[in-house]
Image: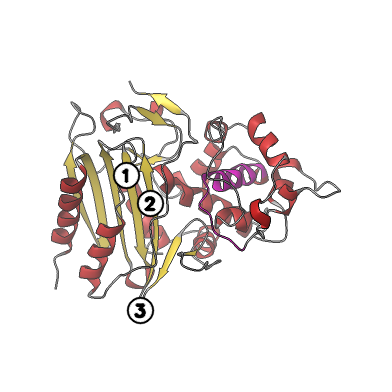
Amino acid sequence: MPDPQELLDTAVHDFQQANSTVGIAAVLWYEDTAYYTNFGRNRKEGPAVSNQSVFQMQSVQKVFTGLLFASQVVQKRMQLKCVPFMKYITGNVPRGPQWIYQVQPWELATHTANFPYNIDGNPAQNLYKGQGPPAGLTSWWSNFAPTNNTILGCSWAYSDLGVLSLGYATAAAAGQTYPELLRSFIKEPWEMVNTWLNMDDVPVDLKVGGYGTGTTWMLGVKSCAVDMLSFVKHHLKLIQMKSEHEAAVDLVLKPLFCPDGQPTMGICWQISEQPKYRLYAKDGGGSGFSTWVGLIPEAKCGVVFLANSQSKKGSNWLRYGKALFSELLGTSIGEGAEALCEPSDLLEEEPQT
């Protein structure tokens, strides 16, 4: 039987060798045991990386937004389909043809709303600061029209802007700010002590910096290996949860859309149907960070990789995660969960201190 610790150590070593990575924190959950591996330093001259070191999550934060959206669906404050997402923001559906009022929440969550990857003006900063959408974003919404006569909900195109719009709608429907909702539904009940939105709140010895040209921290979800293990274990249903949490987890892991030649989509999760297992994955990269989380619920198994590298774009962990699962479970985890994330340009950057 393969040694889980050796497999995790090998994945971290191989990624580091291939990507000039400065610091890595990784955790694997398998057969009721947590395996950790840490490498390098938080910053060039900072303390060694630990299980509590806080990394920028990059686009892995989308599965946080997806879970918060699902929480509002199960509490009947939002609907997955049949209601335009803009109704939750404006409170009404105006008469007359406006394309933006044709877009439903599930389309934002599955990247099928025909939104572009991003727009100028850092529209995410307000969400993570607990504010409403900026004027530039509301103006873009009002002028939205699908390109090339695309039918909404039928064509897949990865979009930071789509999930960001879902975040604004979710906060509005909840009657809370995004930071309040993150704290009340995920951070506190799941005891994710070192999960933050603003790096200013993080103890200085736990701050992990990006390198190369990524010399700033961005607004958005930040977390550590210990907290992400809690996130994984809750999604694997290994920890007793309140009914609304369990229902939200069920919803985010439900396959919703299967585009030709692309991974099946749940709510912000990419899903790969394998012969024996279903792999759920989400990756993130950019500004000197590279992150990945993978779940195989049937095997009660999950892995998280957090890295800061010398590459501005970041390098993807997908091949290393698939190799680890293949060796660990004795089956081939092949194609079908391709990493389609691109580095986000939407989040405002915060100066490092």
Query: Label 1 crowding class (10 Å Cα cut-off): few <14, some 14-19, many 20+?
Result: many
Q: Disc 3 marks which residue?
A: 275
| Quadrant assignment for the N terminus | bottom left
Q: Disc 1 marks which residue?
A: 290
107 or 193: nearer the viewer = 107
Residue that protrudes farthest toward the bottom in the picture: 275
Bounds of the magenta span? Answer: 154-172
Q: Can residue 32 be seen here?
A: no
Quarter location, residue 239: bottom left
Q: Disc 2 marks which residue?
A: 283
Query: Measured from the top left, where is residue 345 in percent x and y?
Result: 46, 36
Q: Considering the numbered disc 2 on the image, is that residue within a helix, a strand or a loop?
A: strand
Question: Alpha-carbon distance for marks 1 and 3?
Answer: 28 Å
Please tell me whether residue 209 belongs to the stretch shown in magenta. Answer: no
- 1 and 2 marks in contact (CB < 8 Å): yes
Residue that protrudes farthest toward the front in the picture: 148
Three-letter amino acid code of the residue under disc 1: Ser
328 or 243: nearer the viewer = 328
Q: Can residue 44 be seen here?
A: yes
- In the picture shown, does residue 274 fall above or below 90? below
